[in-house]
Amino acid sequence: MPTFKPAYLICGDDHGRIAERRAGLRELAEAESGTEGVELFEGERSTPDGVAAALSAMTLVLSRRFLIVDGVERWKDKELDELEAALAAIAPETTIAFFAREESRFKAPDRLHTAVKAAKGATSTENAVKSWELPKWVAAQARALGLELEPGAPKALITHVGDRQQRLLRELEKLALGADGDQPGDGPITLSVDDIDRLTASSAQRGAWTVADAIIAGDQQAAVRTFLALRQQGERVAGLLYQISMRVRTAQEVAAAIERGESPAKVKRTLRMPSRAADRLIEDARRIGAERLRELTGEIADLELASRGGGPGGIGEDTAAVLVVAGRAT
């Protein structure tokens, strides 16, 4: 059975992690005391005087009483007289938790930190890792899970998943579970950039990229074959078109940058994809040119309209898609 301190203050700029901790505490509290033993203070109810009055009030709850308070990052030190006194005399079998989602000038008051500690409570800070430190953090979290990420793999994971630490950690946990037993020996499982690309992108996403890359490379047969296979798997045309158009638009931007005189190495650093895929895209985009890729982008946009019944003749979405994938590949 968990043990609880009289007071907690959880603050910081990692709002996702703070939300997770709030949800976790509420779940524990309701398991301990039922919903009747948990009081929430949010929005207009979340004021220092209101919380102080509730903390000092008599209650008929027979089990531990929990008060969960949001929004304390907007409180001021000068408003905390009554709350400070209530915390100093907090009743046994009572736990209060304050949550502050901090940013710029909005911070949990210093006086609240002091009052929580004086009540024999605990404070903790949940701050997001800075963007330039995130690859190192990802590698360290992976190592703790028995994964060894090769150079470039942490950045590839961030590219696929985004920069939210909780989302990255969940993805690493999935990778650790999925890779368990794939490699011999008792040492860590090593994942390359290509492994990350293969394991984190959805099958539909990878397939749509393959279609787009084949269109850009001028391989009509590969484009049509992959597109039809994806449709047979039940993938929706609209979803595939979105991924294809994004890839072609990226190639257009690459070609335009090269034509402006930017170096391939500089362009490559801007691409959110594995190294070898980026090299291939840059090579194909440079060969085709920005103007032709701009035309392709427009053709895919016309296809989206036709697939929704907006094109001339009202052709079906599959027919319209195959016409573009097969007939308009370079």
Image: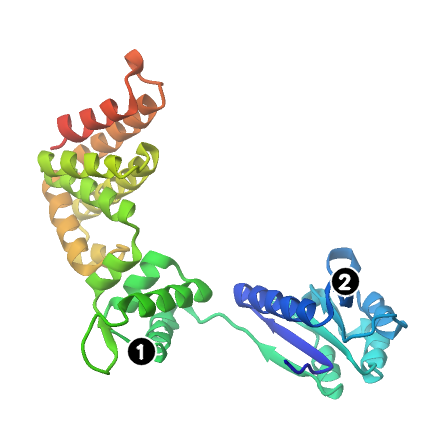
Residue 150 visible somewhere in the drawing: no
Q: Which of 293 and 84 is in front in this view?
A: 84
In the image, which disc is placed on residue 326? Answer: none
Within the image, what quadrant is residue 256 found in? Answer: top left
* Amino acid type, label 1: Gly
- Residue shown at the point (41%, 68%) measured from the top left: 169
Look at 68% across and 78% down and name the residue there.
8
> Would residue 71 appear left or right of 296 to someone viewing this image?
right
The residue that mark 1 highlights is 146
Few, some or many C-alpha atoms within 10 Å of disc 1 (few <14, some 14-19, many ≥20)? Answer: some
Say which amino acid is labelled 2. Answer: Ser
Residue labelled with disc 2: 46
Please give the name of the residue rendered at 63% of the width and 80% of the height, measured from the top-left corner: 2
Above/below status of 187 relative to 126: below
Residue at point 83%, 74% (across, down): 62
Residue 208: quarter of image: top left
The x, y position of residue 22, in whole percent, is 62, 67
Comparing labels 2 and 1, the label whose residue is closer to the camera: 1
Callouts 2 and 1 close, C-beta under 8 Å: no
